[in-house]
Amino acid sequence: MMNTNRQARQEHRERQEISQRALGKEDMQQRVVPLCVMMMLAVMSMACWSSDTLFIPPTATVLPTDVPPTPNFSSKYALGEEVTVVTAGIAPLYITKQPEPPSRSNRVPNAACYADSVVVIEGIQQVDGVTYYQITCNNLPGWVSEEVLSAGR
């Protein structure tokens, strides 16, 4: 009988040790899981708000077109004057990088003026007898010919 009590106590101790180990694992999981979640949130937050190039690749800055000096020829509009963009239908007017006729290769990317847009003359240049005006559309500077502008609003 004494031997059976000893065995029972031994088994009881072993069961307690096993349950304590199991509780230790659960306790560890309860500590590790929130820590991992917090680490993941911190990394995601850095990716959203960081200005570091590790997470967000740099983009090219658009350089404004140089404003030429005051022209020595007469033009329909003056520097600083507000004019209205005139287009046929609903098609946008594409502005060019240099004072020249528009083509697909010389357009200012993402810069298009729509009919009845009011813009300010920022530069004037004459090329091959055609007068071009520097204006800004969608916060991007570019050039248009005199024929697509109208005085006033």
Image (tube, rainbow, N blue to C red):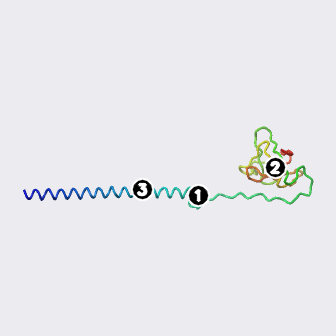
Q: Amino acid at mark 2?
A: Val
Locate the C terminus and report the quarter of the image it occupies: top right
Q: Which residue is mark 3?
A: 34
Q: Earlier in the sequence, mark 1 or mark 2?
A: 1
Which quarter of the figure has residue 87? top right
Find the distance from the CA under tag 1 to the CA under tag 2. 35 Å
Q: Residue at x 92, y 53 (%)?
A: 74
Q: Amino acid at mark 1?
A: Ile
Find the distance from the CA under tag 1 to the CA under tag 3. 27 Å
The tag on residue 144 is: 2
Q: Earlier in the sequence, mark 3 or mark 2?
A: 3
x, y percent for residue 97: 77, 54
- Disc 2 is placed on an element classified as strand
- Indicate left or right for 88 with 21 as reference: right
Q: Which residue is mark 1?
A: 56
Badge 2, how many Cα within 10 Å: few under 14, some, many 20+?
Answer: many
Tag 1 and tag 2, C-beta contact below 8 Å: no
Q: Nearer the viewer, residue 137 or 58?
A: 137
Q: Nearer the viewer, mark 3 or mark 2?
A: 3
- Disc 1 is placed on an element classified as loop
Q: Nearer the viewer, mark 1 or mark 3?
A: 3
Q: Residue at x 81, y 45 (%)?
A: 85
Badge 1, how many Cα within 10 Å: few under 14, some, many 20+?
Answer: few
- Disc 3 is placed on an element classified as helix
Q: Amino acid at mark 3?
A: Pro
Locate the N terminus and report the quarter of the image it occupies: bottom left
Badge 3, how many Cα within 10 Å: few under 14, some, many 20+?
Answer: few
x, y percent for residue 129: 90, 51
Find the distance from the CA under tag 3 to the CA under tag 2. 60 Å
